[in-house]
Amino acid sequence: MTTITRKPENPTAHLTPEDIEQIGIELDAIRQDVIDSRGESDAAYIRRIVNIQRRLELASRATLLVSVFPPAWVAGTVGLSVAKILENMEIGHNVMHGQWDWMRDPKIHSTTWEWDNASTAEGWKHSHNEVHHTYTNIVGKDNDLGYGIMRVDEDQRWHPMYLGQPLWNFINACFFEYGIAAYDLELGKNLSMPKEKRSETFKRNAKNTLRKIRKQATKDYVVNPALALPTGSFLPTLAANFTANLVRNVWSHSVIMCGHFPEGVETFEKKSIPENETRGEWYLRQMLGSANISGSKLMHLMTGNLSHQIEHHLFPDLPSNRYAEVAPKVKALFEKYGLNYHEAPLPQQVASAWHKVVRLSLPNGWLETTTPANAPQQLALLWTMATGDRRTRRAAQARLEQLARRQRTEVAAAA
């Protein structure tokens, strides 16, 4: 996943500045076509999804009132899990992007929506809409790359602590809504400061986030289980709410990883981004820094249409139900300009993203050069790197990279 400017072959080297600006013009035209054609059918779509989600959640919670009976527990838990995914992905995420603001409906508007999530709408919109979508996949600027807790690029110096990266990523997936809330607050950076140096903005946002978490936890883990007390269903309902939140968190984490972290998605150096980045240059970075998930209409709905992550990053404010319509036009543009349209089924993208998490948790070249035959020696080398000083790690890293280059050369020669 090394940054695009450090790759042996830059996938954009064949593009002229004029090509890049023409890409911007053509993408602007695609966007304008959708804006000009937005109408009642789009408004009816989002209102229908909101109604379905609310009815499903209500029915599921009602079913869980008798969740002491296993069939009711299963039905209620599945329904609540789906309802929470729909609320977060297809509704909350997209409403807060301003995709439906053109309707001027105060009930479905980015300025009024508050979602079923630990993050506050205000904090999420800043970290996601303003920061992530502006600085997509720029190492050191886009904190969505690894959420500040993972090694996301070969050029980042390896340290033994990164061996725990797969475990951290799994824990983050299970409690994703809380990880995102901490990320929105830049919690690590702020807690490392003396209290007196923390900004008033951080203090206010932290207080709002804690209030939001308390409200969500009270609803899921106190009020709804308490309503089930008369039927002896307190504990089953409590477990159902925990399970639904877990399912929602793991699903959301997986979808988002598939959009930004599979092998082949490009990252960028801060110094390679021009200070006055043009519209075409920004579009090109979104095209190369995102990946799609292929699948059915139901799968697209359950991902909040973030299965069309490329189209979403190009046009974050267009109605999500229109991404499937513009995707063929965007894909044709990729082909026209000789760019890689990164798309694969969900299992393949999830496996690719996790492979990268594991690969980057290890020193550069270690996984590539390890075979069943040399595994004992490689594990001994890894132990030496994990327990040795910086000088030892650097020397071992150099040997690993040299071996990896030699193997790549041999494979290329044999081909």
Image (spheres, helix red, strand yellow):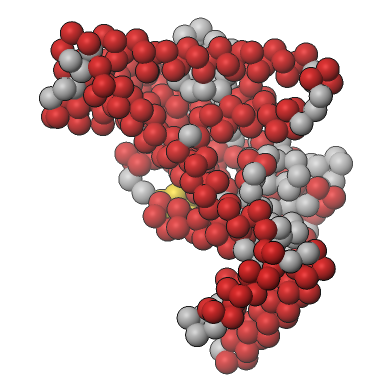
Percent x, y of residue 109: 53, 14
Above or below, comparing residue 91 to residue 346 in the picture: above
Q: Is residue 360 left or right of residue 51?
A: right
- Residue at image x 37%, y 36%? 247
Residue 45, image quadrant:
top left
* Foreground of the two, 392 or 286: 392
Percent x, y of residue 324: 44, 41
For the C terminus, the quadrant is bottom right
Q: Is residue 181 left or right of residue 302?
A: right
- Residue at image x 48%, y 23%? 117
Percent x, y of residue 176: 50, 35
* Foreground of the two, 7 or 208: 208
Above or below, comparing residue 338 to residue 402 in the picture: above
Query: Can residue 183 be spotted in the picture?
Result: yes
Q: Residue furthest bottom?
A: 414
Above or below, comparing residue 279 to residue 353 in the picture: above
- Residue at image x 22%, y 11%? 229
* Foreground of the two, 380 or 205: 380
Query: Can residue 31 be spotted in the picture?
Result: no
- Residue at image x 79%, y 42%? 278
Percent x, y of residue 94: 51, 27
Q: Is residue 230 left or right of residue 355?
A: left
Q: Is residue 343 left or right of residue 381?
A: left
* Foreground of the two, 257 or 301: 257
